Structure formats: structure tokens, C-alpha cells
Image (spheres, rainbow, N blue to C red):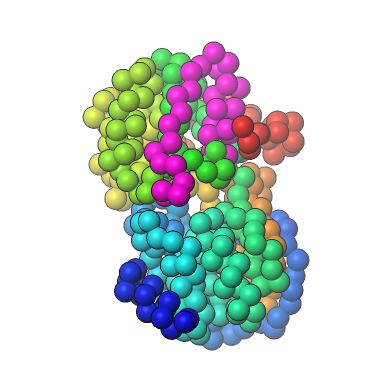
Amino acid sequence: MRGLRLAAGLMALGLTLAACGSKNDTGSGGTTTGGSSAAASSLKIGLAYDIGGRGDQSFNDSAARGLDKAKSEFGIDIKELEAAAGETDAQKEDRLRQLAEGGYTTIIAVGFAYETAIEKTAKDFPEVKFAIIDSAGPAADNVANLTFAEQEGSFLVGVAAALKSKTGNVGFIGGVNVPLIQKFEVGFTAGVKAAKADATVQVKYLTQPPDFTGFNDPAKGETAAKGMFDAGADIVYAAAGGSGNGVFKTAKANGKFGIGVDSDQYNLPALADVKDVIITSMIKEVDVAVYDFITSVKDGKFAKGEKVYDLKAGGIDYATSGGKIDDIKTKIDEYKTKITSGEIKVPSTK
């Protein structure tokens, strides 16, 4: 049965092989489960992308930068597999099993959508070290859960949006209406209101689960942003993966502005034609988490359980590239200090 499922998964999904990774040590949490240090040359790292894959200019690309850095520094054997739109948990599971059965003893699943697949696969491959990005579950001795305080970074870009808006009307576009993306929305709204209590925040989600195409549909991003601009917004923050590219395109066409997510999107070559409308980005250091995890396995320091990358730990930040928020940076940093000191507790749920 496993063979049949694997064959079906391969036919439906296909493979993408490439050489693939980011920064330094950060974060907290986890319990060391031990294991001797592995020679870098013997490490075989498998990475399964979320929808959009390498090249999404956002979430997946950040994970890829972490993998690329580890490959460059450690000379490890890597294999990357892409996700497909509309796939099932069984297909995700088959992807992870393919890596495990192929001898990849360290496997990274990019995105909370892999939670069920990781839970099932980890039980059958107890010798494999797994990591899942953006999910506190499942709890297992061979699973590291790498999560982020997205609400904190979103608060800071919310402050930026409020202070730079000329209309007092800004927008938030989420890729899919799930609890993770709601953290971005809630933090952004809190930041906007902290800086300008009477500001209006328009909110739109591109799709509802189980439809996850909202993370990779620039046309939907364009349409949603156009509606917000027509309704008076002059700045829109998109937490929508590749769909955010459509938001920037519409912003440029309408003389408005956008806020990026996950990566410093102003500096991404593929977005060079719209960079002038990106005033800041909420940086989520997925690359750091991926690199840290691979390093921990290499050094024999794998830690199971949740490791939270927050603002204080340097896992979350905001970008200043382009100089468009230089005039308000001092004000944003005041809020940043209040968050890291605990004076401000940024909400993460509605």
C-alpha cells in the first residue's frame, strides 16, 4: 500500500530537485533529545515546500535561503520537493515518506499544513529528525516545532502604516483565513490603532480553508487590493505569500503603497519593478529557523518541541530598505522597545 501511495503521489505532484537557505542563532524553547554529532558530509536534508514553493518571493523563499546557507557552509546533501495546489494531507504525507524512504534523515516541512502529515510520518520513522515551520504540533520525540511571533512584527508595520497613511485608511489582506494568518491581522490592527486610534483598517481574506490557493494567486491579490484602494485605503499589508505580488502591482498602478511580509521584499530582484511602492516589510526569519535546525542536527544538539522566534530573540523584525520610513523609525523603535521589554503585550487572537 505504501508503494501504491508513493507512486500516486509522484504522478500527481512531480519532483523538483535543486540545490538549496540564512543567518545565526536565535530563539528559545525545546528539550534536547541528544544524539551524537553528525559529520556534515553525511547529512542528508530533505525540505518539503508549502504551496508556491521556491520562487514565491516570500515565505518559501525565506526557508530556501536557510537551506542554501547550510548547503554552502556544510556541503550537505539536499533534496527539495514542491507542493501542488489543492493537494490532500495524504499527498503531503507521501512527499515526506518519499524523503524518509530515500535516506533523508533530517526533514523540514515548510508550513502548518504539514501538521497531520508530520504526525503520521514521524511515528513510522523514529530515527528521522523532523522540523515543521509554523506549527506547535504534533508533539513527538523526533519533531521540532519552529514557530514565530508574527503578531509582534505585524504590530510594528501597523504603526508604520498608520503614521505614513494620508487618508487614515489602510488595509490588510490575508492569504487564507486560518489562525496563523489571523495573528498577522490582529497584530497589524493593534499597531495601527496604537499609533492612530481613529484609523480605519479594511480586512480581506482571499480564500477560506480547505482552499489554500490564496497563498499563491496574485490575480486575487490584485482584485482585493484594488477594492481597498477604491474604498479609500492608501497602504495595504499583505500576508498572503505569492499573492502579495499582485497587491504591489495594483498599488503601483494606483499610486498607492504596500507592505511586504516574511522577506525584505523591497530587496528581492523579482520585485524590482514594484519596489518603489514597498514602504516596509514584516520580516519573519524562517531562514534563521531552518539554518538553526540543520546546525543543531549537525552538532548533535537536536531539540524536540516548540522553539519560538519572537521580536526579542531576533526572529521577527521590520525592514527599512528604501528609506520610506526613515522619518518615523524612531517612533517605531519606541514601540519595539516596549514590546521586547514586556510593556506592550501584542494580542495574537481576535
- Region of the chain picked out in magenta, as a range: 183-212
Q: Is 213 left, or right, of 116 in this rendering? A: left
At 34% from the left and 68% from the top, the residue drawn is 13
**Can residue 48 be seen in the rendering of this structure?**
no
**x, y percentage for residue 335?**
63, 30
Vertical placement of residue 42 versus 280, above or below: below
Q: Is residue 228 above or below residue 62?
A: above
Q: Residue at x 56, y 80 (%)?
A: 105
Q: Nearer the viewer, residue 350 or 19?
A: 350
Instruction: Report the side of 341 relative to 242 (left or right).
Output: right
Observer-nearest residue: 114 or 335?
114
**Which residue ends up furthest to the front in the rendered image?**
1
Residue lying at 41% horizontally and 48% vertically, measured from the top left: 211
Residue 290 spot, x, y in % from top left: 54, 63
Tell me what residue is drawn at x 29 percent, y 35 percent. 222
Q: Nearer the viewer, residue 313 or 185?
A: 185
Image-quadrant location for residue 20: bottom left
Q: Position of residue 347 (x, y in %)?
A: 65, 34
Asked if residue 171 lies left or right of residue 185, the reply is left
